[in-house]
Amino acid sequence: MNLEKTYQTITTQVIDQQILLITLNRPEVGNALNTMMGQELYELWRDITEDCGEIRCAVLTGTGNKIFCAGGDLKERNGMTKIQWKRQHEIFERHYWEMTDLPIPLIAAVNGHAYAGGLEMALSCDFIYASRSARFALTEVTLGIMPGAGGTQNLPRAIGERRAKEIILTGKPFSAESAYEWGLVNYLFDADQVLEEALKTARVIANNAPLSIKQVKKSIRYGSQMELKTAFRFEVESYNHLIDTADRIEGVEAFNEKRPAQFKGS
C-alpha cells in the first residue's frame, strides 16, 4: 500500500524505507485539527493498520518549529449546529482511536506548542520528544467543552490523577520543563533538533525485530488494563507467538555469531 499519498492537510514521507514521517500541515492556523485533517489522519491510520508494508516505525510532527498543533479549528467550528458538531467529533474520535491502536510504534516529535486536541494527539503516541520552548495545555473547559479525545484518560495515566485534574480543571498551560519533570515527555531538545532526534530513535526501533515490537505494543497497551496476574499471562501468550518466528531464530544466531541481526518480520 502506498503511504506517500497526496493529502490536503498532512504530508507523508518514507525515510530509509522503514520509517514514515507524518507532518500536520496547516501552518497558517497553527496546524489546527479541522474536519479534513481528521478524515485524512483516520484514513492514514487505517491504511497503516491494514498494510504497513516495510514501515516499522512512524514519527508525527507539525510544520514549522513554533506550533505542533493548536487543537481543534475553532473558526471552522464557529456557528456549527449540534448535529454538525457531533458529526465532526465522530470523525475525530475515529481518528484518535485508530491512532491509539496502531500496530507499529508512533513517536510524537512535538516541535512547538501542543494545546487541547494537539496535546491529546501527542498523548495518543507511544512516547514524546519535545522542544524546550513548547508549551502544553488542555484548554477545553475555558471554551465550554471538555477533553473528548482521550485527554481525561491518557493524561492521568501519564502524570498521575491529581496533577492531571489541576491541568484539566484550570485549563492553564504548562512548560516543556514541567512536562519532562512529570514524565509526560521523554526528552527535551532545541526546536530544530526535535525531529532529528525522534528519527534517530525511530531508526533504532526499526532495526529491531518488527514482530517483537508489535507484540510488545499489544502487551503494554492491553496488559495495563488487566489485573496483574492476568496481564502476566497475556504477556506470556504474546511472547509465545514469537518462538516459532524466523526473526527469533535469526536473533539468536546473530548474537552467537557476533553480527548484527537482519530481521525480516517473519
Image (cartoon, grey):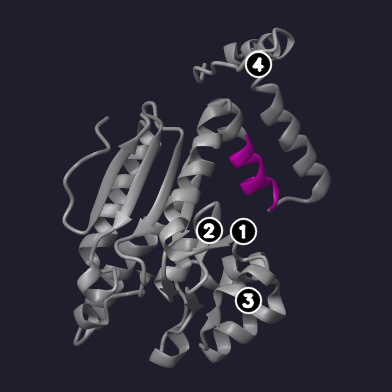
- What are the residue bounds of the magenta stretch? 216-224
Please, what is the three-letter code of the amino acid marked with disc 1?
A: Asn
Could you tell me how far apart the alpha carbons at marks 1 and 3 are, in whole angstroms? Answer: 12 Å
Give me the residue at 27% from left, 76% from top: 73
- Where's the N terminus, which quadrant? top left
Identify the mark nearer the N-term, 1 or 3.
3
Contact flag, marks 2 and 1 (Cβ < 8 Å): yes
Identify the mark nearer the N-term, 4 or 2.
2
* 118 up-or-down from 142: above or below: above
Contact flag, marks 2 and 3 (Cβ < 8 Å): no
Q: Secondary structure at mark 1?
A: loop
Q: Give the left or right position of residue 37, taking residue 179 as reference.
A: left
Q: Give the left or right position of residue 95, taking residue 187 as reference.
A: left
Could you tell me how far apart the alpha carbons at marks 4 and 2 are, in whole angstroms? Answer: 29 Å
* Residue toward you, 233 or 24: 24
Please, which residue is most extreme toward the right here?
229
Residue placed under numbered mark 3 in the picture: 178
Identify the mark nearer the N-term, 3 or 4.
3
State which quadrant residue 14 falls in: top left
Identify the mark nearer the N-term, 1 or 4.
1
Per the rendering, the mark at residue 251 is 4
Identify the mark nearer the N-term, 2 or 1.
2
Per the rendering, the mark at residue 129 is 2
State which quadrant residue 242 falls in: top right
* 169 up-or-down from 246: above or below: below
Residue 266 sits inside the magenta stretch = no
Q: Residues within 10 Å of mark 1 (few under 14, many from 20)?
A: few
The secondary structure making up most of the magenta span is helix
